[in-house]
Amino acid sequence: MADAPRPRKRILSGMRPTGRLHLGNLVGALWNWRMLQDEYDCFFMIADYHALMSEYEKPAGIRDNCREVLIDFIACGLDPGRSVIFRQSDVPEHAELHLILSCYTPISWLERNPTYKEQMEQLTSKDIHNYSFLGYPVLQTADIVIYRANLVPVGEDQLPHLELAREVVRRFNHLMGREALVEPQAKLTASPRLLGLDRRKMSKSYGNQIDIADPPDVIRKKVMSMITDPLRIRVADPGHPEDCNVCQYYKVFDPSAHDDVADKCRNSKWGCTDCKRHLAEVLSTLLAEPRAKRAELEAHPEQLHAILAEGARKAQAAAREVLNDVKALTGLGKM
Ligand code: TRP
Ligand code: SF4
């Protein structure tokens, strides 16, 4: 007799809704998330409570940004038929578990969190000296454990948060005397590093990004502004494709053309303008399908509402189970 199929491992990941997503998000997260759907039971979350922690002064944009992120999620192949796609604040159980877990989180663990220290020093444009901001990773822990997620696909910058989540889970389980919460693990996936147009990290705050939603004329204008090999001024100057950001984009978005591009560059068979014009076409073609899906969703907001309603329903059902268990263990609720 064949073995009973083992239940699939569960994945949760999330993104803060700060606006439309860009190629960095596509390459660094969405391509990977889309693939994970084949193998895992996936929960993908739009983390609007987390957005509020830094955007509280001007929160009006959060709701629109949630919509943009949702559209980008679906346009890039996250499938609401297979995965639970939801908005964090639609499942207030996260907030309740956050409060309970905060009792099990020593302040010193939060204060030594490198992300916190870094943001406090670097994020001078926003006042983040708030109670909630210190507890950012506690809410993130609640996000994960409330679904008993085994694996959390995140970038390296999030590893300290995952480590903290594991520590909180161990502390809670130890004090409760049983494995009530599942200890999650980070799932790091090697993804190509994509720099922005100016070769700094791609980020909206630098304004150096290409959005998934950008139409062909905008893509072309942006690609034309990319910094290339500074030593190549005339076509006759042999180029150094390995040092050129444009060539890196070929590697990521049109790998089969990469060698040919590098050869044409090194041997002066084409100029940078030709090279970029062609890259703009490659990107426009690649983004044509997401762009079409985007247009369809924008024309049918009722589809977006239905996706969020269904996501909230499924997420909440799963979250309630864990929260009820935790409340029973911690003496809360029911007499
Ligand atoms: N902190 C994550 C980020 O900034 C977003 C996030 C919130 C998240 N909750 C999460 C990621 C839970 C993974 C799991 O990218
Ligand atoms: Fe870069 Fe292309 Fe110019 Fe070579 S030809 S330097 S790869 S833009």
Image (cartoon, helix red, strand yellow):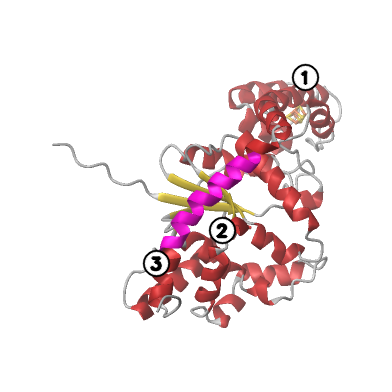
317 falls in the magenta region = yes
Q: Quadrant of residue 90?
A: bottom right
308 within the magenta span? yes
Task: Measure the alpha-carbon separation of dots 2 and 3.
Answer: 18 Å
Residue 2 in the image: state x and y as whole percent.
17, 37
Residue drawn at x 83%, y 27% as measured from the top left:
217
Q: Dot 1: few (<14), some (14–19), or many (≥20) neighbours within 10 Å?
A: some
Position of 231 with respect to 133 (left or right) is: right
Residue range of the region highlighted in magenta in the rendering:
304-321
Amino acid type at circle 1 is: Trp
Q: Residue furthest top?
A: 269
Reading the image, the residue beneath label 2 is 91
Distance from the alpha carbon under mark 2 to that under mark 1 = 55 Å
Relative image position of residue 88 (x, y in whole percent)? 60, 57
Residue under the point 71% across and 38% down: 243
- Quarter containing the C terminus: bottom left
Query: Closest to the observer: 267 or 61?
Result: 61
- Look at the magenta stretch and give its main secondary structure: helix
**Residue 192 appears in the figure:** no
Secondary structure at badge 1 equals loop
| Disc 1 versus disc 3: nearer the observer | 3
Please give the residue where the numbered disc 1 appears in the rendered image: 270
The x, y position of residue 32, in whole percent, is: 53, 41
Query: Disc 1 beta carbon < 8 A from ligand 2?
Result: yes
Q: Secondary structure at mark 2?
A: loop
Q: Is residue 306 above or below residue 10?
A: above
Q: Quadrant of the N terminus?
A: top left
Q: Quadrant of ligand 2?
A: top right
Q: Which residue is mark 3?
A: 181
